[in-house]
Amino acid sequence: MVVRHALGQVRPRLKPALVIAIMLGCTLAQAQARDIGAAVPFEAERTSDATQAAEAWSGLDVRQWRLQLRSDLYSDGLALRYFGQKNWSDNARPRSGMNLVQIDQSASMSVSSSDQGHQLGWTRRQMARLVASEDTVRRISQIDRGENASESWSWRPDLLLRGFSGEGLDWTYRSSPGIGWSWEGGLQWLRLSRLYGRELTGAVSYDAADQRYGFQAQSSQVGSNLKLPFQKPVETLGQALLVHGHIHWRSESFGLSAGLRDWGQLRWTGLPQQVLRLNSSTSERDENGFVVYKPSIQGQNSQPVIRWRAPYTFDVAASWRLGSAGQLSLQGDRVPDFGWLPSLRWSRTLGPLDGALQWRMHQRDLLMQAQWHGWSVALSSQGFRRNAHSQVWTLAYLHRF
């Protein structure tokens, strides 16, 4: 069924062992790395944009580099360990309203001249997002189990999946144009090795008296792994151009920020696409003139130029300084076709250690973060549970020359 195939497509694949080994080796060789959490006076960081650009690009004046591994998995209504499993429908427990499944995994390396100015890096990413209504997950899992409901029902399927994998360049520019203000923006260009999507719309009903389903639905599937009869050659790789940016304002005791991540286009020429239309109420006459009702299935295969909007996220945050008690932040991520993902974060500095706790309200998960002598780590509390719906971890290292 659609959801089972979709969950199979977004199964995480990142293998970070090699990059971790490189990061550990770099740490041993560079034991005198500066403290990433050290506070630097604002005025000492300010230089003109022209000076920053010259330092960043003239003679490749690299003053710091960073390695990072990151994995963020989340699923509403289905534990992560059932992704792609045949018995997924036996364990589906959809939440009320819209349900979200999201995967964002990356491995990246970047170099820059300082915390301001240009930053250039390489990144490898896997990103997928599935949004489906509660009824869609519940009814499809019921059909997948082969169960007949005890009473009649009708519903309108609502499911959308977009996902991609690729690698490429990541450029970012940071600036502080005035006291209290700062901003950053950049581009990410990726060569896509995989692009896939599914969409289910229409109407479905079930008559308990006759134990019969009624369909007027449409299912579309697009994927670089999809094979069609008489398929024409497909471009080996796709492309993605993604924009990201944030703006920040801060006073002595209060701060605001807003930003956009992964806004852009995913493109692939000649990608296989299959569209199926199912109508269970079509009719025709037999040889005796009687009306006969039978289901009708229509399929259409094509290889268009796929141009999709990337699965972007809009975020806002407000923060308050609590003096020696640290800082408190209220944050929210806006996911298109789904809604808000709010969180509450508390952070504090203790000598060379910067620590933070972030309660992600929708995910019902506590994210623990720490920075110490160039190292940054993060781990979610649900990662220790067998039936976790959320698993987040980050491992990064920053070295300053």
Image (cartoon, helix red, strand yellow):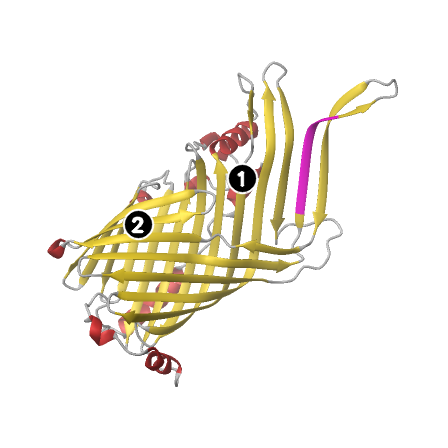
Residue 280 part of the magenta-drawn span: yes
Categorize mark 1 by other alpha carbons within 10 Å: few (<14), some (14-19), many (20+).
Answer: many
Q: Position of residue 288 (x, y in %)?
A: 87, 17
Q: Distance between the residues labelled 1 and 2?
A: 27 Å
- Nearest the viewer among 190 and 381 is 190
- Nearest the viewer among 247 and 31 is 247
Q: In which quarter of the image is residue 38?
A: bottom left
Q: In this view, does 228 lie above or below 243?
A: above
Q: Name the residue under label 1.
A: 159
Let me know if residue 15 appears in the view: no
Q: In this view, does 221 lie to the left or right of 95?
A: right
Q: In this view, does 338 lie above or below 20?
A: above
Residue 151 part of the magenta-drawn span: no
Q: Position of residue 236 (x, y in %)?
A: 63, 62
**Magenta span:** 274-282
Let me know if residue 207 appears in the view: yes
Categorize mark 2 by other alpha carbons within 10 Å: few (<14), some (14-19), many (20+).
Answer: many
Q: Residue furthest front?
A: 178
Q: Which mark is residue 331?
A: 2
